[in-house]
């Protein structure tokens, strides 16, 4: 259990540092603007490849089943996962997938970011996170390792969303503040407004 939590914590810290504006500015000063066009792609590849050992760790460590949902509920959970996967794909396509992955930067260079508020972003601020979490938590079979893995990833996603929103507020200012005040983070219909 500790190994899973620790590995996700280390991965999350490294992932967050590499995504930070300060680190990217440091690297820009070191490498120059020309090489920074490859940063987003390199960052995504590193994040993916460094996550594979964590996933393998979850699979190889001793484990035991906590529960297994039987039919017809199992089919409903699988259908929920399928729907969440489709909505995740739809949300991903809205973000500009070539830019998100880091490929369009090679022929377009660095372009100013645009605040996406339509489509699934009209309902929640973080649809990619929401649908990823639904895919995890609607699993009809739960083991101890998976529970720890899912809980750790969920914690990281909520912490990451907090820091991502701070960055979006710096980047988009009042436009993002207004959007944030009217859209829930990940639970549709749940918006907390501060009293002035």
Image (cartoon, rainbow, N blue to C red):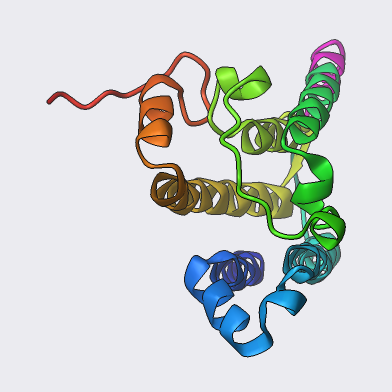
Q: Position of residue 138 (x, y in %)?
A: 73, 28
Residue at coordinates 70% horizontally, 31% vertically from top-left? 131
Q: Position of residue 49 (x, y in %)?
A: 84, 69
> The N terminus is located in which quarter?
bottom right
Q: Name the quadrant containing residue 127.
A: top right
Identity of the residue furthest to the left in this view? 196
Q: Nearer the viewer, residue 165 or 149?
A: 165
Image height of 11 relative to 143, above or below: below
Q: Position of residue 36 (x, y in %)?
A: 71, 73
Q: Nearer the viewer, residue 165 or 117?
A: 117
Residue at coordinates 59% horizontally, 69% vertically from top-left? 2
Q: Nearer the viewer, residue 123 or 177?
A: 177
Marker count (numbered): 0
53 falls in the magenta region: no
Residue at coordinates 21% horizontally, 27% vertically from top-left? 194
Q: Name the quadrant containing residue 89.
A: top right
Image height of 99 relative to 30, above or below: above
Identity of the residue furthest to the top in this view? 72
Q: Which residue range is magenta in the image? A: 68-78
Image height of 116 relative to 24, above or below: above
> The C terminus is located in which quarter?
top left
Q: Position of residue 102 (x, y in %)?
A: 80, 57
Q: Nearer the viewer, residue 74 or 165?
A: 165
């Amino acid at each position: 259990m500790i190994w899973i939590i620790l590995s996700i914590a280390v991965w999350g810290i490294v992932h967050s540092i590499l995504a930070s504006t300060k680190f990217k500015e440091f690297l820009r000063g070191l490498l120059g603007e020309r090489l920074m066009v490859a940063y987003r792609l390199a960052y995504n590849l590193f994040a993916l490849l460094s996550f594979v050992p964590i996933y393998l760790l979850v699979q190889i460590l001793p484990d035991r089943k906590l529960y297994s949902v039987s039919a017809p509920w199992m089919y409903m959970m699988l259908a929920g996962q399928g729907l969440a996967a489709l909505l995740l794909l739809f949300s991903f396509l809205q973000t500009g997938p070539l830019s998100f992955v880091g490929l369009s930067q090679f022929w377009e260079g660095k372009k100013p970011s645009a605040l996406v508020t339509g489509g699934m972003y009209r309902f929640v601020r973080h649809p990619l996170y929401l649908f990823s979490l639904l895919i995890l938590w609607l699993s009809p079979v739960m083991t101890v390792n998976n529970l720890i893995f899912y809980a750790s990833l969920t914690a990281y996603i909520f912490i990451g969303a907090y820091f991502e929103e701070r960055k979006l507020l710096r980047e988009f200012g009042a436009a993002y503040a207004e959007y944030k005040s009217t859209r829930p983070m990940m639970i549709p219909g749940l918006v907390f407004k501060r009293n002035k």
